[in-house]
Image (spheres, rainbow, N blue to C red):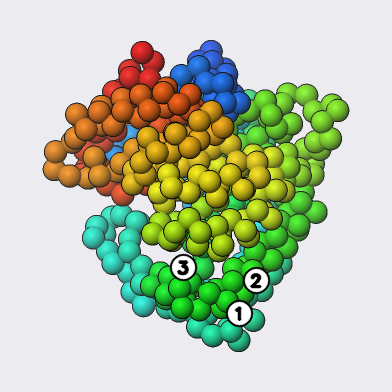
Amino acid sequence: MEMISISAQDKGILRELGKKYREIAELPVQKETITLWKAINSLKPVRPMVMIDQLPWHELNAEGELTLKTSDPFCRNIETKLRRELYKWKHFRTDMVIEPVLRSSPVVEGWDFGIKVKETEKAVTDVNNDVVGHFYNDQIKEEEDIQKIKNPAIRLNKEKTEKDFETMQEIFTGVIEVKKEGIMYGFPVWDVIVMLRGAGELLLDMALRPEFMHKIISRFSEAYLAGLDQLETQGLLGYGFRTIHCSGAHTNELPSFLEKFIGTGFDPAKPRAKDTWTFGMAQIFSTASPAMHDEFEIEYAKKWYERFGLVYYGCCEPLDKKIGVIRKLPNVRKISISPWADVKNATEQIGKDYVISRKSSPAFFSRGNFELDAIIKDTKDVITDCKKNGTPVEFILKDLSTVNYEPKRLTEWADTVMKIVKK
């Protein structure tokens, strides 16, 4: 098996970036930040934690720091990841952690359900932005269409996986360690169904054809669980990831994060779901009642989450009125409280039982004027509500489709919020 042929110039560029990355990873602050993440993830926070992720990278390269200099596609992929991490560390590091290792991902094929997404068109507002609107074609209109949903047939492309790993090792030898990693999978099943049906059709059928929708979600849940079985059997699950759904994942409660595995039952060669984090959401249920959320999401999601060690639940959907039904889910540790959720209501219901993963509003960044005063007020109000109820809280800024081509807004947000949480 031959490695990918890499030019001396490309290799030199990546090695220089790797050196910078390793130097940052070896700073004492990394261990200090990991300790803080472990504390909040154990529901014993030292202070609120802060992270920034999912950015409009096409708007951030004003000074050329993100401009790629390698030519080979394999190298450009690695270079993109390194430059973005270094950029975040320099301009808005918040509580990010950089580890002294680069990870080589497996090439896994077959995680699909037998139906491909079909779109009528896309709504594009910025040709440089890969965040666009979608108009989906309904492919599961009748009960016979449910038969189209197949179980995944997961397989590891061993040759490609080994070739990628050995090439990375050859590039970075003597600079930074390269490790193989597995895959993190979640249960965003309703996001998948939306793309196969369309939002309007799905919501109408939950009200008008509930039994039909139960058959759809039941079949998809079976398919997801069949895929999970295959990932476990083939030893493809990832472990020890530093983030879970844009939030810090370090913890002492999962054996996969411990330095020594003796006596834990954890085998790095064959990770189990219960050794790891997972995540999930049901964003289409934003306007659904707690009872409907319970009926169509919670009752099915239970089967996935009971297999895992810890769970991050939610995304953009407001969940402050649904804490009661979320309590039915096993192993939940963090609950997303989006910009459209009432923090006071959420903290009163949660108390000390979960971490609130507070999502700051992307709207503060998208308008003509950067709304720093509103950000300060929102952050302080959230901390006040959380202190009143003893609720651990982290501030996560994500889902940014634009910063109005002003990257400094992210730096200002990070500096401002970090000052508040450290007081």
Q: Position of residue 204 (x, y in %)?
A: 42, 75
Q: Is mark 2 on a helix, strand or loop?
A: helix
**Which amino acid, mark 3?**
Val
Quadrant (top left, top right, bottom left, bottom right) of the C terminus: top left
Q: Pointer 2: what residue?
A: 219
Q: Which of marks 1 and 2 is nearer the N terminus?
A: 1
The image quarter containing residue 221 is bottom right
Q: Where is residue 384 in the image (x, y as percent from the top left)?
A: 35, 24
Residue 98 to residue 154: above or below: above
As measured in the structure, the alpha-carbon distance from the residue carrying label 3 to the one carrying label 2 is: 15 Å
| Circle on res. 146 | 1
**Which amino acid, mark 1?**
Ile
Q: What element carries label 3?
A: helix
The image quarter containing residue 70 is top left
Residue 204 to residue 6: above or below: below
Q: Nearer the viewer, residue 3 or 140?
A: 140
Q: Is mark 1 on a helix, strand or loop?
A: helix
Q: Is residue 99 visible?
A: no
Q: Which of 44 and 294 is in front in this view?
A: 294
Question: Pointer 1 and pointer 2: residues touching (CB < 8 Å)?
Answer: yes
Residue drawn at x 70%, y 60% is: 225
Q: Where is residue 92 in the image (x, y as percent from the top left)?
A: 35, 28
Q: Pointer 3: what residue?
A: 194
**Which amino acid, mark 2?**
Arg
Give the residue at the far left of this rendering.
368
Q: In this view, does 380 lie to the left or right of 329?
A: left
Residue drawn at x 19%, y 35% is: 371
